[in-house]
Image (cartoon, coloured by chain):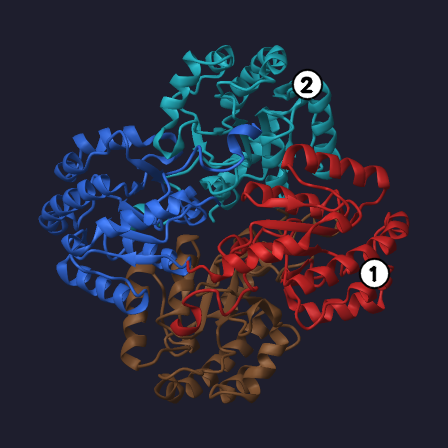
Chain colours: A red, B brown, C blue, D cyan
Amino acid sequence: MPEKNVDLHGSAPDKHKFALLLIDVINDLDFPEADQLLKHARPMARNLLRLKRRAQKAGVPVVYVNDNFGRWKSDFRRTVEHCAHHGRGREVVELLRPEENDYFVLKPKHSGFFSTALELLRYLEAQTLILSGIAGNFCVLFTANDAYMRDFNLFVPSDCTVSNTKKENDSALALMRKFLKADTRSSSQIALRAAQKNGQKRRGRRR
Amino acid sequence: MPEKNVDLHGSAPDKHKFALLLIDVINDLDFPEADQLLKHARPMARNLLRLKRRAQKAGVPVVYVNDNFGRWKSDFRRTVEHCAHHGRGREVVELLRPEENDYFVLKPKHSGFFSTALELLRYLEAQTLILSGIAGNFCVLFTANDAYMRDFNLFVPSDCTVSNTKKENDSALALMRKFLKADTRSSSQIALRAAQKNGQKRRGRRR
Amino acid sequence: MPEKNVDLHGSAPDKHKFALLLIDVINDLDFPEADQLLKHARPMARNLLRLKRRAQKAGVPVVYVNDNFGRWKSDFRRTVEHCAHHGRGREVVELLRPEENDYFVLKPKHSGFFSTALELLRYLEAQTLILSGIAGNFCVLFTANDAYMRDFNLFVPSDCTVSNTKKENDSALALMRKFLKADTRSSSQIALRAAQKNGQKRRGRRR
Amino acid sequence: MPEKNVDLHGSAPDKHKFALLLIDVINDLDFPEADQLLKHARPMARNLLRLKRRAQKAGVPVVYVNDNFGRWKSDFRRTVEHCAHHGRGREVVELLRPEENDYFVLKPKHSGFFSTALELLRYLEAQTLILSGIAGNFCVLFTANDAYMRDFNLFVPSDCTVSNTKKENDSALALMRKFLKADTRSSSQIALRAAQKNGQKRRGRRR
């Protein structure tokens, strides 16, 4: 249907220089090592919620990038309900439950960029991604690799990712700092106000 | 989360040599030329429903491949509800309303393969796609091009696609026959029983 | 090796708002229908050479997008030599032989965008593609579909593509005009001077 | 041109269950840390050459996956000549110089799968990749991540990759063992004879 699809302006996130990605936070944490991860997941979720609130105020698109737990049959809402009621992730899900204005992308595999519409972020105006979520040394790291390869600037705030152990999370953050040039400063140190200004300037420009 | 994602067996359609794709049938048909299209859309929907029932019986995965009408915020269920209650497509939507065992893939642009998980069908065992839906000379044709380029065998049953005019639909079918080697026989002539047998044999084999 | 790959500035075409794509012009035309195509191919090649010269003067990147005739073992130079000495395409190849400053992308299938680096054009500054080459109703059309889906503006100059028959070529041009919003004016009517100006302005801007 | 492109059988590596990938071994090693890497690169190249000879005997396709050093203008042959005569990598290049029957894929960025035809390996019969080359903790690791995500089984023989320091290489190998389930046994321990048998059986089967 041509008229709807001339471009993605009608079917994609608002344009902004920044985007905040929440990776696999809607999660039933139903795997053996989840016990130890869970201990760190709750404070992480509180930090991430604060960051999400600041992003919303600054007009930065908030994008959930999530496994769909249930083949190609589940939608995201069903995934959220499943995870909010089952498994050890429900406290995290309650804190980070998606809201009306959030975006979401269901990913079939580890990286948020693999076989999903996230690839299209680059066509929009996003230049800098803030990555967060579970697990820091797995799906966040895979997504960070792909984002770096696509020339995005990266923030991976150290207090907004969690892995099975703190040691593994620190080691993943060190990798992303060294090889992906990621800025891993704590979330409260990320200046979203500045981001918003640039975003607005860019929004005025015609492509 | 490694254990879930080692492969797609846990998150993708059942393996079968065939797959039936319903393209943009969940549609509000909210564009100027829809009047003339609608006349053909109702009988098409009835033919397609019969084909869907036969596919279900034969164990062929039924995959809805659909625009999402509403940016990256909408899920498929919301899209279905929207289209079932608004726009001129609601009779079609009622007939073809997705059921519990159907799969779906939201596409951001014209081709079902572009920036979606549909790409992964090829990794599974599907070798032959049956394409159907709206519009035959646009999103169905774009999807057919991409499927052909990925070496799928194609059926595009002539009574299960519709375009703004019959002439445009016939012309698209002729293109697909000539250049994409598509078989455009009428849906009732497609032997899904045979498909099932091959599919079962393949299913027994380890990859 | 990180330093080389931070972005594509060191490994991709110069930035320009336009790019001229020559599709499968390096071709041995070794197929049954080539006789009739060849008659139109020579004048097409002369028109395309004139357009190429104008593009070069205007600083528009000239990109050969070509099958590689010989599995993944051949390089483009070998393909050029093969086609310059064999097959019925050698006059066309002589006229359009790639030069030192031209770019090239080997494509494995019909569309220049499928499994090639051409996808990356969009990350650079190209917004408008001028498509040309052989055959207008096949590889040019497949590439045009993919370019349109990626939101490029399209020129497909009617005197710079050729198909087996004039009728088929006209019909492909009509399709691209109608569905892909392609501008099919004759090559001499494309104002490359204007393109250059915009290109230079954009080049001054930091990304 | 339809007849040539119906599938990739005519334009892609021979079918085999295995493929050996040599990543960025054609390299001018023109970066500050190359001194320390070079010390390990020569013995690595000798090990890799032995593995390549065994692969050739077993009918396993040998695929060079390489940066192109020179924008989209260079072909692989030119890259080989450049690196064979310049930079500190020339001894490695001499040992591993591509031969008539080898395949090659030019990659624009870190992973061999990103915007290249390598993606198509999966459509063929390859199920297991043997990854080797430079640098173990960078382009090899990026390629391994992408291969794992596409459900390939992985060998990354510990004596056929090299990074700036032995510590970094060991750490990358440990990552790939742990998270990508890679088998990092030494190259002499990989049973290519077995691979060949399976490969031949599969080759006999019709798709």
Residue A15, percent from left and from top: 54, 61
Residue A84 location, quadrant:
bottom right
Where is B55 relative to A121, above or below?
A: below
Quarter of the image for residue A22 reads bottom right
Circle 1: element type? helix
Residue A88 in the image: above or below residue A132: below
On the picture, is D165 further left or further right than D41? right
Q: Secondary structure at mark 2?
A: loop
The three-letter code of the residue at mark 2 reads Thr
Read off the chain for label 2. D
Give the residue number, with chain letter if any, for mark 1.
Answer: A92
Residue B49 on image: x %, y %: 51, 81
Residue D15 numbered mark, or none? none
The structure residue drawn at horizontal position 58% and vertical position 11%, both measured from the top left corner, is D42
Question: Left of A74 or right of it: where is A97?
Answer: right
Horizontal and vertical percent position of residue B186: 38, 76
**In whole angstroms, how far apart are the C-alphas of marks 2 and 1?**
40 Å
Camera-side residue of C22 and C82: C22
Callout 1, which amino acid?
Val
The answer as to whether the residues below labels 2 and 1 share one chain is no
Q: Position of residue C134 (x, y in %)?
A: 23, 49
Tags 2 and 1 touching, CB below 8 Å: no
Give the label on residue D165, or none: 2
* Viewer-nearest residue: A165 or B174: A165
Parent chain of label 1: A
